[in-house]
Image (spheres, grey):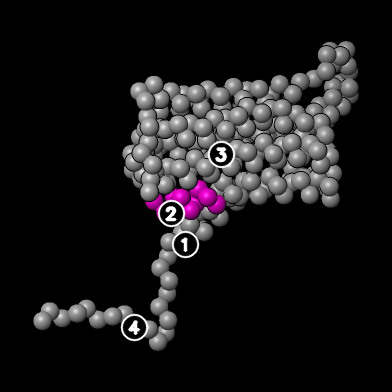
Amino acid sequence: MNETPSNPAHLSKHRLEALIDGIFAVVMTLLVIDLRLPERARDLDEAGVRRALVDLLPNFESWVISFLVLAIFWVANHRLYSHVRQIDSKLIRFTMLMLAGASLLPFAAAVNAQSSTQIGQIVYGAVLVTMGLALLLMWRHIYRNPELCVHPVDAHTWHAACVRASGMMLISLLTIPLAYALPGKANIAFGLMFLVRPVAEHIATRMQKPAPLLIDEEPEAPSQPA
């Protein structure tokens, strides 16, 4: 049985959405802090600047991945909150968990860029798994509590959201053993992020299809009125 949501007047959906947008904007901006030349760069010749830029490639790679990850999660939050009419304390807690993960991403990205060991990948993967798990809990909560929604989340949307969030978490976990097998190359697994959405839509659509009739089965004839 669904719980009756508690929504005191001070719990505003629009203020929570504004907080989400603000934190994502700040975090996306903070990611670029590690993309800077050393202070001695002004004294370098052209070859030295070129070498300094090459040294920044791991930071740039980490920035690209982290920016795309944040963009994916921001779109996912926008999609989720388009269903929401009012919020309750549980939805706020799950949202704050996701925002906590997002706020740690610049730190995790810096560790990931500076360390090609499993530890660096574990730190980065742990943050992304936290965000994915929080997003999954948010979707489950509004799916199970349609009274919170402007329009209830249908089964297709719920299944697609599950696959997308689970896919992001699995990709993040996959990078950890890859960091051991391919030091410094584990981030290539994040290229799979671009497959998550089409795969999620395909799986959700397949789950919605009715089971086919067996060859020897025939549809029941409509009963005739007496």
Mark 2 falls on what kind of element? helix
x and y percent of residue 44 in the render? 88, 16
Q: Main secondary structure of the magenta part?
A: helix
x and y percent of residue 82 in the render? 40, 37
Instruction: Decide which of tag 1 and tag 4 comes sooner along the chain.
Output: 1
Q: CA distance from mark 4 to mark 2?
A: 28 Å
Which amino acid type is shown beneath numbered disc 1? Met
Residue 17: in sight, yes or no? yes
Circle on res. 101: none
**Residue that badge 4 annotates:** 218
Q: CA distance from mark 3 to mark 1?
A: 24 Å
Instruction: Decide which of tag 4 and tag 2 comes sooner along the chain.
Output: 2
Q: What residue do we see at 84% from left, 24% from top?
A: 52
Give the quarter of the image for residue 99.
Answer: top right
**Category of crowding for the residue at label 1, using alpha-carbon neighbours closer than 10 angstroms: few (below 14), some (14–19), many (at least 20):** some
**Quadrant where the C terminus lies?**
bottom left
Instruction: Decide which of tag 1 and tag 2 comes sooner along the chain.
Output: 2
**Residue that badge 2 annotates:** 156
Q: Which residues are magenta?
A: 154-163
Instruction: Decide which of tag 2 and tag 3 comes sooner along the chain.
Output: 3
**Residue that badge 3 annotates:** 134
**Category of crowding for the residue at label 2, using alpha-carbon neighbours closer than 10 angstroms: few (below 14), some (14–19), many (at least 20):** some
Mark 3 falls on what kind of element? helix
Q: CA distance from mark 2 to mark 3?
A: 20 Å
Which amino acid type is shown beneath numbered disc 3? Ala
Q: Are marks 1 and 2 in contact (CB under 8 Å)?
A: yes
**Residue that badge 1 annotates:** 207
